[in-house]
């Protein structure tokens, strides 16, 4: 029995699934190339593209790509990401043989279903009436400019557009033990520098903790303080013990902890307490922006993060455990790593509830 050798490995498949546009080159009988952007879908083996109803000057059967494929079935596709940070440049090139699948066949039906699944716009287009271009990949080559560096983590980056990154970022509270390459941690922190801040003064500093002994020391110290405060709330001792154990594990087992500290020394100073308080509030708001930038970047790089507010409740304990300068106020502890499993997401309120006035 003929078993096709999968040319598209898991990484190439994920890359194709995550992207929405490819550039396809076809050649005519004389070898003259022609290139078009195409929407496509893949089942992991084949790549399909519809002859759809986007405006065209000629009927589908007269399209150059169709005439070329009939004359010479050799095609090549490129799917790519451009980024001003050239360390993020990536592309996938797929070479293969194309054919036209006629309507009424099972493969045509499957291809239409895959395309409609990927592009909701096709629900309202009569793409099933036309043949589908089917590309049998014969070679695939993935390139990332960071491939020859030490930035390769346990998971590939998430090649998602901005909307998908914003919606996809999630709070993860349990991680696999896989370490995070130092270069990835640096990229996460580097991105956070670009968060907005009052007067552009960046009123926050980061402490990075990767050493198990330091994580354990921090978890122990925070646990002791928390135990004392929970006792004040008259919580049942079993509940206290469980919450303490859970928080201890979260801190101890995260591959990397990033502590965001408020640093207000460079901000403006006012003689009156009201303006001084507003200045501090601005700094805290900015720390939140830095935290979100950090989490989104981590997510983009294939990582996940959490957000622990516990340092707010015991800043002195955290500062002492990590031997930090007195000018830093520990605010948020972000455990980073590769998610042990997909977490449940909390639903969001609708815009109708959130936008209180629009005139
Ligand atoms: C200021 C702040 C403090 C938070 N503190 C904690 C915390 O101590 N422990 C925790 O598990 N999650 C904490 N979170 C995460 C939220 O619970 C989480 O963002 C929210 O449930 C929405 O889930 P999502 O991040 O998966 O979208 C905190 C988030 C923020 C913004």
Image (cartoon, rainbow, N blue to C red):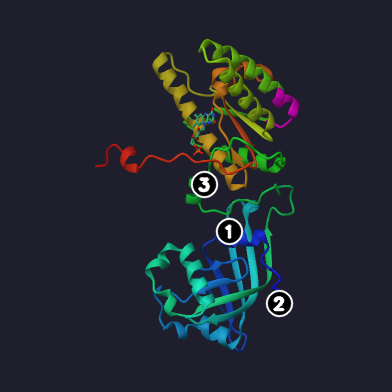
Q: Quadrant of residue 47?
A: bottom right
What's the distance in space between the residues labelled 1 and 2, CA to CA?
35 Å
User: Which residue corresponds to the image point at 69% horizontal and 68% vertical from the top-left?
Assistant: 6
Please name the residue that numbered disc 3 is placed on.
168
Is the shortest distance between ligand 1 and the CB of mark 1 under 8 Å?
A: no
| Residue stretch rendered in magenta on the structure | 209-216
> The C terminus is located in which quarter?
top left
Residue 212 lies within the magenta run = yes
Please name the residue that numbered disc 1 is placed on.
81
Disc 1 packing (10 Å; few <14; some 14–19; many ≥20): some
Viewer-nearest residue: 254 or 284: 254
Viewer-nearest residue: 309 or 343: 343
Mark in front: 3 vs 2:
2
Residue found farthest to the top: 232
User: Which residue corresponds to the image point at 44% horizontal and 82% vertical from the top-left?
Assistant: 60
Please name the residue that numbered disc 2 is placed on.
2
Which secondary structure class fits the magenta region best? helix
| Residue 28 image label | none
What's the distance in space between the residues labelled 3 and 2, CA to CA?
40 Å
Mark in front: 1 vs 2:
2
Task: Give how far across and how far down residue 31 sits, in percent.
Answer: 62, 85
User: Which residue corresponds to the image point at 61% horizontal and 65% vertical from the top-left?
Assistant: 44
Q: Earlier in the sequence, mark 1 or mark 2?
A: 2
| Secondary structure found at label 3 | helix
């Amino acid at each position: 029995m003929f078993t096709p050798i999968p040319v598209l490995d898991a990484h190439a498949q994920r890359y194709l699934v995550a992207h929405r546009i490819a550039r396809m080159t076809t050649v005519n009988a004389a070898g003259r190339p022609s290139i078009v952007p195409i929407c496509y879908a893949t089942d992991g083996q084949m790549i399909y593209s519809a002859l759809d109803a986007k405006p065209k000057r000629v009927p589908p059967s007269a399209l150059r790509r169709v005439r070329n494929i009939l004359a010479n079935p050799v095609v090549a596709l490129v799917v790519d990401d451009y980024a001003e940070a050239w360390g993020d440049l990536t592309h996938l090139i797929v070479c293969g043989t194309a054919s036209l699948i006629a309507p009424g066949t099972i493969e045509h039906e499957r291809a239409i279903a895959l395309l409609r699944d990927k592009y909701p716009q096709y629900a309202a287009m009569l793409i099933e009436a036309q043949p589908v271009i089917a590309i049998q990949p014969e070679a695939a080559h993935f390139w990332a400019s960071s491939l020859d560096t030490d930035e390769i983590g346990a998971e590939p980056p998430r090649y998602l557009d901005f909307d998908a990154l914003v919606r996809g970022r999630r709070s993860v509270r349990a991680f696999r033990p896989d370490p995070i390459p130092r270069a990835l941690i640096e990229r996460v922190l580097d991105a956070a520098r670009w968060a907005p801040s009052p007067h552009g003064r960046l009123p926050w500093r980061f402490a990075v903790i990767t050493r198990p002994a330091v994580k354990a020391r921090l978890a122990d110290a925070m646990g002791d303080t928390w135990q004392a405060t929970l006792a004040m709330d008259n919580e049942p001792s079993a509940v206290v013990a469980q919450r303490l154990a859970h928080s201890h594990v979260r801190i101890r087992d995260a591959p990397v902890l990033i502590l965001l500290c408020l640093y207000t020394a460079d901000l403006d100073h006012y003689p009156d307490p009201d303006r001084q308080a507003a200045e501090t509030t601005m700094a805290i708001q900015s720390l939140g922006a830095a935290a979100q930038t950090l989490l989104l970047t981590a997510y983009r790089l294939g990582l996940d993060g959490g957000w622990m507010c516990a340092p707010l409740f015991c800043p002195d304990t955290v500062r002492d455990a990590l031997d930090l300068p007195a000018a830093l106020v520990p605010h948020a502890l972000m455990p980073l790593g590769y998610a042990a499993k997909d977490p449940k997401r909390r639903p969001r309120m609708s815009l109708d509830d959130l936008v209180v006035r629009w005139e």
